[in-house]
Image (spheres, grey):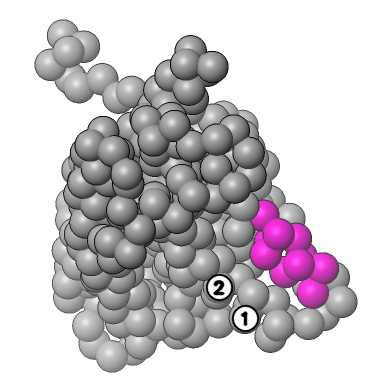
Amino acid sequence: MIVVRLLIGLAGALGVLVVLSSAVRSVVLPRAFPARVARVAFLAVRLPIAALAARDARRGRWRRREELLSLQGPLGILAQLATWTLLVAAGFTAVLWAVEHHPASPAGVSAAARESGSSLSTLGIVRPAHAAGEFVAFAEAGVGLVLLALVVTYLPTIYGAFSRREAVVAKLTIRAGAPPTPTGLLRRSWELGRFDRLEEVWHSWEEWFIDVGESHTSFPQLTFFRSPRSHTSWVTAAETVLDAAELVHHALDVASDSRSELTVLAGVSALELIGEFLGIPPAAEGGPGLDRRVFDQALTELAQAGLPVVEDHERAWRAFADGRRRYESLLFTIAGLADAVPTPWLPAELFGRHRPPVLRPVPARRDSAEDG
């Protein structure tokens, strides 16, 4: 029996260490490290919500669908916090049962669970009877305080990143319409006499892509946080800016702007980082997913607004399709995962063409210095 108690106690202690490792990976470490416990807890909430939302979509209940999808991010985070707390309590219950020599019965396990709950919450209602148990109780109280401190910093950090992301997305809807489109961004800038100031857009979105690439891998739950407006999405906004920059490069007869190309490079880098963390394959080769008619309609709309559209539409299409291929498949897959609002430029039938395994381990990135 002593051996059994020892094994159960060690298993409980190991479980606590696993939970603490998950919490540290999710909250403290600045780099994107996989945390399987946190991911399972988040998926336990996301998967049923996504299934209910899909059912509502089939029945045409779009408002209810949006309400359900808006819950998956916040509830997923609460599920992670609750899972960490419950697993820590369960682990210390096993340790206290072992060191306090509680009987191997439901009553004994219940007594150990009460001691664990009292210690974790630092209430001290139930005290262990032995010195070893008191030592475990002190350790659990310390772990409880650490978890509380992590929660206090975790939620504000996530919502701060969410607010930064959505502030720029909301600004884009003013410039490009709601939902935003690449042609809307270019046409409004031209009509308002601000086309020569598009550098403001490219600069702010270059910084936005850098911030999103960092925050959405450090806190991958942000991928599933929906925009406050039901007709907008951070994925759609990213597509709008990237496609607008490609249109300026290949479809308009204007001076080349290096800032827009830097924005595209920042966007591709951010999508690749997010895709790598989520287990999405790199950009696929092959033909473009965008319908050629959407591109032709865009050129017609821009020409009617007075923008200098190039004469060779066929050449412009080939160049645009080649440029878009750098980020297109990643956009489609991330849009499917995030249940983004579809647009003609981001059609729903192409979402999730490379759906990743939900628990795929994240490969470690190699720095350029290590590669050398």
Q: Residues within 10 Å of mark 2 (few under 14, many from 20)?
A: some
Image quadrant for the N terminus?
top right
Residue farthest along the left direction in this orientation:
369
Between 249 and 80, the residue placed more toward the observer is 80
Residue 98, image quadrant: top left
* Nearer to the camera, 130 or 253: 130
Q: Quadrant of residue 175?
A: bottom left
Q: Main secondary structure of the magenta part?
A: helix
Q: Which residue is mark 1?
A: 67
Dot 2 and dot 1 residues touching (CB under 8 Å): yes
Q: CA distance from mark 2 to mark 1?
A: 7 Å
Q: Which residues are magenta?
A: 46-56
Question: Judging from the image, what secondary structure is the residue with disc 1 in?
Answer: helix
Label 2, on which residue? 71
In the rendered image, residue 119 lying in the magenta stretch gets the answer: no
Q: Which amino acid type corresponds to the residue marked 2 in the rendered image?
A: Leu
151 to the left or right of 358: left
x, y percent for residue 74: 46, 69
Give neighbour class at mark 1: few <14, some 14-19, many 20+ (Cα, 10 Å): few
Query: Furthest-top residue in view?
Result: 372
Relative horizontal placement of residue 211, taking residue 349 as reference (left or right): left
Residue 66, image x, y percentages: 63, 78
Figure quadrant of the C terminus:
top left
Residue found at x 24% / y 43%: 134
Residue drawn where x is 55% and y is 43% of the image: 109
Give SS at disc 2: helix
Q: Eyeballing the image, is 55 above or below 67?
A: above
Instruction: Name the residue rendered at 78%, 72% in the picture.
Output: 57
